[in-house]
Amino acid sequence: MVKVEQNWQDNVKLFTSDAAIRWKATQPKDSQKIRSENSEDVLTWQVFRTLYACGILARWVKETLGIRDCFRPYFWQRQHDSSDIDADIREAIREVEPYHVAHHVQHTETDLILRGEANVVMCEMKLGYKCRHISRWRQSTGSPIVPDYEPHARLFITDKSTWTSTVARFAQLYKNLFIGNVLCRKWSSNGSPLTLHLLAVVNGATCDEGIGGSVRTYATEFRDFRNSCCAAPEHLHLVTWQEIGMWIVSETSNAQAQTQCGSDSGKLLSFIERRLAEHPLL
């Protein structure tokens, strides 16, 4: 049985006074989920808010994704200490999704954005059960692929004639690329756009067993996404929560790193190390 806390703070545990997580906890669509031990929003917050607080987010990005930069995170399109969506991100959404704005329907809400001085990393997080159908990046059945997406899709999709079906299949990934591309232009400080990256964080234990013994994983589905996309392959990244956990284990076992982080940061890292090691879905 999934453990659900009565109070969201008892489930989130870390940085519960920050404005971004407090905002998330008040949203009707999230208020129940955020109390569950299986919440991917909570795990995202615990892990990446801790990496940022400990001053090692940039090192994790460099060692995991091969990107050298200094990053600050935006959770659900907000800085950690703000309940308001970033103004530039709001404008990017208006440019990419005018239909959603005009009709007051749910716009794309990026789980995590890493903003650097030369790079922007749009992050789509997935957790989910170990045995499930691999379809979590698809457009929901009640939400159309609107014509507004077409000019953005043509910048990224290799086969332009299939842009509608391709965006529908990989909607959450492509829509983050669309918004990220606009942000790279808006956040440019010297006239040249920042480099856009996409990061998908997934449960490496998840598999979809088909007829005849075939098995699909997030890795195989992401390979198909890469093949559909004309962005540079080295800018499209897939990382598992398990790999993040292994990196944190190496970090917490490094005596020099522990000394640099200090006792409080060491406790935070130990907490998320245990969290990833003991998580019921991982």
Image: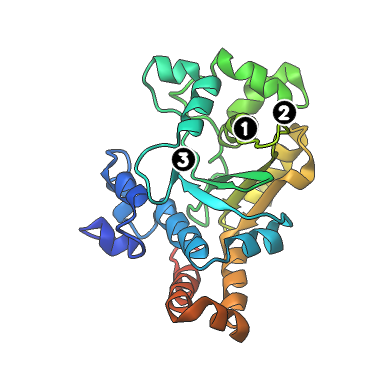
For the residue carrying disc 3, how many other residues have a C-alpha within 10 Å: few (<14), some (14-19), or many (20+)?
many
Q: Which residue is mark 3?
A: 77
Q: Is residue 251 above or below residue 124?
A: below
Residue at the extreme bottom of the image, as rendered: 255
Q: Which residue is mark 2?
A: 156
- The front one of 270 and 40 is 270
Q: Is residue 97 above or below residue 197?
A: above
Q: CA distance from mark 2 to mark 3?
A: 22 Å
Q: Which residue is mark 1?
A: 174
Residue 115 visible in the displayed image: yes
**Tag 2–tag 3 contact (CB < 8 Å):** no
Residue at the extreme left of the image, as rendered: 6
- Classify residue 39 as left or right of residue 169: left
At 22% from the left and 58% from the top, the residue drawn is 7
Numbered disc 3: secondary structure: loop
- Classify residue 63 as left or right of residue 246: right
- List x then y, in percent, for residue 70: 63, 55
**Tag 2–tag 1 contact (CB < 8 Å):** yes
Numbered disc 1: secondary structure: helix
Earlier in the chain: of badge 1 and badge 3, it is 3
Earlier in the chain: of badge 2 and badge 3, it is 3
**Tag 1–tag 3 contact (CB < 8 Å):** no
For the residue carrying disc 1, how many other residues have a C-alpha within 10 Å: few (<14), some (14-19), or many (20+)?
many
At 72% from the left and 24% from the top, the residue drawn is 155
Q: CA distance from mark 1 to mark 3?
A: 16 Å
For the residue carrying disc 2, how many other residues have a C-alpha within 10 Å: few (<14), some (14-19), or many (20+)?
some
- List x then y, in percent, for residue 151: 66, 17
